[in-house]
Image (cartoon, coloured by chain):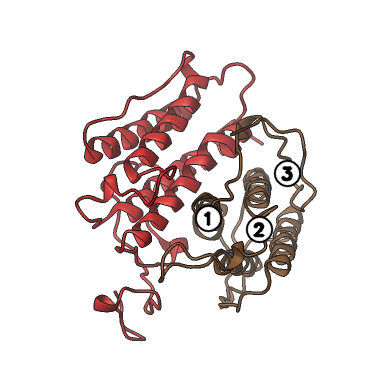
Chain colours: A brown, B red
Amino acid sequence: MTTAPVPTAKDKRELLRHTVATLSYRGGKAISNAPADFEDFRAADDSRRPGEILAHIGDLLDWALSIAVGKQTWHNSTPLSWKDETARFYAALQSFDSYLASDEPLGAPVEKLFQGPIADALTHVGQIAMLRRIAGCPIKGENYFKAVIESGRVGADQSSQRTEFD
Amino acid sequence: MTIEDKRALLGHFLAALAYRTQKALRDAPANFGSFRMEDGVRTPAELVQHMTSVLGYARTHFIGGHYWPEALSTFDEEVIRFHEMLGTLAQHLRNGDVLLDGMTEERLLQGPFSDAMTHAGQLALLRRLAGAPVPPENFIVAEIRPDRLGPDQADPVSPDKVWPEAPTPIKTEPGENQ
């Protein structure tokens, strides 16, 4: 579906980019250093596996980009390996962030991009973090307001300067 | 970036948080608040208390002091207190109140606000693990408004027509709305 560009204050795009950087930082922490079999862990018979959730996050980020460029499309992907889904996660973040950083028009208001795919992805990061705990491989707590999170820094190379706790 | 733009977007963030939290709690079983997946995993009531705590922490950057909320006696009270905190925090944003101690809008977003959003996702996960999953919807068209922060959130505008993961008794057919 093609939509007309929506006039958007560049300022709001910048704060959305900071949210995307936050998603990268928090998501990266939740998916890093997971045991080899974590991607297939099931907390219940009918619950999603972490690998499925990470693939869904990748689909959400692809969807976000499609909305931003004004050609909204949704695709349910088949989960890749954890390693490949991790790479896809960062690549999709980079593509979306690069578009936000450009002068190209947005196909939807920033608020809609936030409340839809980006907020959704944040909730799923929280789910992966909870599944890490249930699976017996919890991530450390962190004071995220002190974290070095920078707009545009959306790859795997995040700051190691962290205020973590058990 | 103007402060007004930043504050408006943060207000929308809080509204999305209100909506998604209620989405995760709507029609939950009566005992959902005390559902304990296993030792070391927060119950829904503990999660909502924690969400109030992190937002209360954010509020201290407007008013100073500390905020350590005690557990309340019922889950309903926890949920009401959470929404009251959302409203209070949103009012500080709307007022243009000064942030203390070098706090910035970006740090509020990356810290307590995003923390609370991840916990809203955990509430939804616990619904699934408690055997009462939350039906999916298209959130981009959801009625999310910065002036609607209480427990009374809008019903979904666009619930998914197909819900493959629906529990057996209420599984929907393709093309049929929930």
Residue B60 screen position, x and y as percent: 48, 20
**Few, some or many C-alpha atoms within 10 Å of disc 2 (few <14, some 14-19, many ≥20)?**
few
Q: Residue under mark 2: which chain is it in?
A: A
**Few, some or many C-alpha atoms within 10 Å of disc 1 (few <14, some 14-19, many ≥20)?**
some
Counting labels gives 3
Q: Is residue B139 left or right of residue B105?
A: left
Disc 2 target residue: A35
Q: Quadrant of the C terminus of chain B?
A: bottom left
Q: Residue under mark 1: which chain is it in?
A: A
- Residue A47, image quadrant: bottom left
Residue B51's place in the image compared with B135, above or below, is above
* Closer-to-camera residue (B143/B32): B32
The Cα–Cα distance between marks 2 and 1, rounded to whole angstroms, is 10 Å
Q: Residue under mark 3: which chain is it in?
A: A
The Cα–Cα distance between marks 3 and 1, rounded to whole angstroms, is 32 Å
For badge 1, the amino acid type reads Ala
Please give the name of the residue rendered at 68% of the width and 34% of the height, measured from the top-left corner: A147
Look at the numbered disc 1 and give the secondary structure of its residue: loop
